[in-house]
Image (cartoon, helix red, strand yellow):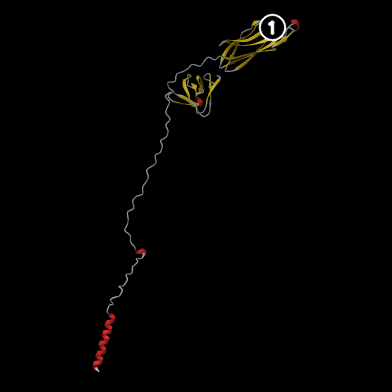
Amino acid sequence: MKSKSATAAIVLILALLGCNLPSAQSTPPSLTETVIPSEQVSFTATTVPPSFTPLPSNTPLPTLTPTPTIPVASPSDKGVNCRFGPGIEWKVVGALLVGQNATIQGRNGDASWWYVSTPSDPGKPCWVAASVTTTAGNVSNVPVVAAPQASVIEVKIDVEPNTMSVAGCIGPLMPVSIKGSIETNGPTTVKWHFETQQSGSMASQTTDFNKADVKEFSTDHTPVLAAGTYWVRLVITGPNNDSAETKYKIECP
C-alpha cells in the first residue's frame, strides 16, 4: 500500500516538472516598444543661426546739375518777353520759353534786366526782366551794357484818292488826303515831314514817342492840274533816316 502511494507521488512530481521545462521551440517573448508621451519628450536645445539681413541695394545717386561757367537766365514759371531795350517801354522782339536757357551777355545799371542771347535767335540779343527769370552761374562779373538807341522801324504812307480824272484838264482839283504812320522800337523823338513831287517838302514836324508805338499823321495836298503820275513821301530825318512812298495819278480824258 505504501509502495503504490510512493509511486503515485513520484509520477505526480515528474508531471509537474515536465510542465515547467522550457520547450526547445518556444518563441522568445516579443519586445514591446515603449512610447513616451509627447509631453514627456525632451529635446536638446539647438542654436538657430541668425537670419541673414541682405545688404541694401545700390541706390542711384541724385543727378547733379553742373553749374554753368557762363551765366544763363531762364523763365521762372512761364515764358517771358525779350525786348529791344531794358524796360517794358521797349518793343518785344523775341521770347524765352519755359525750359530754355539764354546766355547772359550783360545787364543794365541796377541788374533789373539781363541782356541775353536766346536759343531761337542767338544772333540778335535782347533784354529780359530779372524779376521774371532765374539765373545760374556767376553773374557778379556780368558787364553793364548801355541801353540801345531807339529808332523808327517802319514807315507807311497812303493817299486818297489815288486817281483823279478831269475832263480836258480844265478846272481846279480837289485836295487829296495824305496819311502816314510811323513805328518806333522804343522811346525816342522823331523828326519827319511829308514831301510831294509837285509841291516839294512840307513843314518839318517833331513827335515824341514815350514807348515803342505806332502813331498816325495826315495832311491835305492840292495837286497841280497836269496829267501824270506823281509820288508822295513821308520822310524821317531823326533819330534815323527812313521814308515811305506812294503815288497818285491825274488823268485828263
Task: In the displayed orientation, state which residue is furthest to the front.
Answer: 25
**Quadrant placement of the C terminus:** top right
Residue 192 is left or right of residue 14, and the answer is right
Compared to residue 115, the image places residue 197 above or below, namely above
The amino acid pointed to by label 1 is Gly
Along the line of sight, the residue nearer the viewer: 115 or 88: 115
Secondary structure at badge 1 equals strand
Foreground residue among 85 and 109: 85
Residue 14 vs 176, above or below: the answer is: below
Residue corresponding to mark 1: 228
**Residue 151 in the image: above or below residue 22:** above
Instruction: Give percent across and percent down for residue 155.
Output: 60, 14
Q: How many marks?
A: 1
Residue at 69%, 6% in the rendered image: 228
Residue 112 position within the rendered picture, expressed as x and y whole percent measured from the top left: 49, 22
Q: Quadrant of the N terminus?
A: bottom left
Q: Residue 213 at x, y = what percent?
A: 59, 18
